[in-house]
Amino acid sequence: SLEILDKFNDPGLCKELLACLRDELDEEIRFMEVCGTHTVSIFRSGLHSVLPKEVVHLSGPGCPVCVTHESEVNAFLDLAGKDGVIVATFGDLIKVPGDKGHCLKNAQADGARVEIIYSPFDALELARNNPDSTVVFLGVGFETTAPTIAATVLMAQQQGLENFKVLSFHKLVPPALDVLISDPETRIDGFILPGHVSTVIGIHPYDFIGEKYGKPSVVTGFDPVDILQALLMMVRASGQEHPAIQNQYVRGVSENGNPKAVEVMYQVFEESDALWRGIGMIPGSGLEFRAEFEKYDAKKVFDLNIGECPPLKGCKCGEVLKGKMTPEKCPLFGKACTPAKPVGPCMVSTEGSCAAYFKYKVD
Ligand code: SF4
């Protein structure tokens, strides 16, 4: 079976697919990918540079770190400054700046307890080992991550761990796609839909893209052959009045996703409005605790106020995330802002568009 997987990187197949794409294209098609793993794959494989010029690649809001709003980072900093609180987080969040440019790494340097963990279950362990402190896990991620965090909350409940809390800033992908595709200033002809998120939610939450906007979109795997095949499927479906969502990634995604994971997620959380960096408030695009789990809700327990705040000065991540600007057009790109000294989240995250442009030296 490894041989079969090799096929998804086969240069000969890629060439054939590129030739088909060239043959079948009769007008420009502008596609957006909304998953950081796709972003990296498109650049690392060189696809971004070899696509026919009529196939315009727009990099969207692909990674949860990049779309974490400045005011959400301010809430992390607020929490980190409280006595008796241990902030538990995945490592990629600690350099993400709030509106004043400060990040958790600065807070850590100032003496705050910020612990990097690799799984939310490690945060339970931390809570167990520190009974006199309150451990707050920063719940940042899409539908891929949220079910695991929900399962962690259920475990805390079973184990009676009262000093474990979660700050839920989870985000849901389909409502953001609706906002992006309906933006009159950006023309998007179709989406390469995220493989991992779709493993959980299946293909139907995206039906509105064809039904409401008449645009073709394809759930896609992560290798170059996957992406080229998906683009060909997209080209073939463009022009249809209401194209159905297609699934290129059948080896990873089933039509209905993982209903058990979705059930666990909605057992603990319910949909809420959420702030996205560069985009602002998107109705129904977040997850907050259901009332019966509110004692685990860091927002409630610490009475955190999460409102709009000004964007981070100088950083154009908002424009980049919406596909309105490519990273190298940002005046700070490669000068004041590099992966070693990132200014904004799209450069902080290895899956961010700015980091990918920098690393793979796209011109
Ligand atoms: Fe923000 Fe840096 Fe990207 Fe410019 S290059 S948009 S400052 S992350």
Image (cartoon, rainbow, N blue to C red):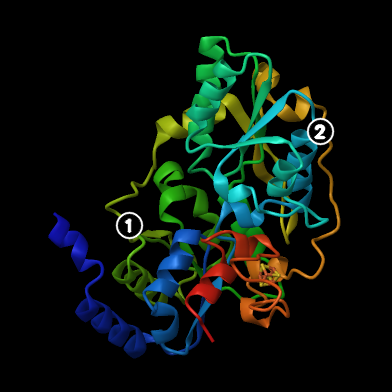
Q: Residues within 10 Å of mark 2 (few under 14, many from 20)?
A: some
User: In the image, is residue 346 above or below residue 95?
Assistant: below
User: In the image, is residue 60 above or below residue 159?
Assistant: below
Kind of residue sitting beneath label 1 = Tyr
Q: Within 8 Å of ligand 1, the CB of disc 2? A: no
The answer to whether residue 40 of the structure is visible from this angle is: yes
Q: CA distance from mark 1 to mark 2?
A: 40 Å
- Which quarter of the picture shows residue 23? bottom left
Residue lying at 71% horizontally and 74% vertically, measured from the top left: 336
Q: How many marks?
A: 2
In the image, is 274 to the left or to the right of 230? right
Q: The residue tagged with tag 1: helix, strand or loop?
A: loop
Quarter placement of the C terminus: bottom right
Kind of residue sitting beneath label 2 = Leu
- Which quarter of the picture shows residue 292? top right
Quarter placement of the N terminus: bottom left
Residue lying at 36% horizontally and 62% vertically, measured from the top left: 222
Task: Tell me where residue 197 appears, x and y as whole percent.
Answer: 46, 48
- Which quarter of the picture shows residue 116? top right
Q: The residue tagged with tag 2: helix, strand or loop?
A: loop
**Which label sits in the foreground, 1 or 2?**
2
The residue indicated by pointer 1 is 249
The residue indicated by pointer 2 is 304
Label 1 or label 2, whichever comes before in sequence order: 1
Residue lying at 65% horizontally and 71% vertically, measured from the top left: 320
Task: Tell me where residue 289 appears, x and y as whole percent.
Answer: 66, 27
In the image, is 238 to the left or to the right of 68? left
Which corner quadrant of the figure contains ligand 1? bottom right
In the image, is 124 to the left or to the right of 72? left
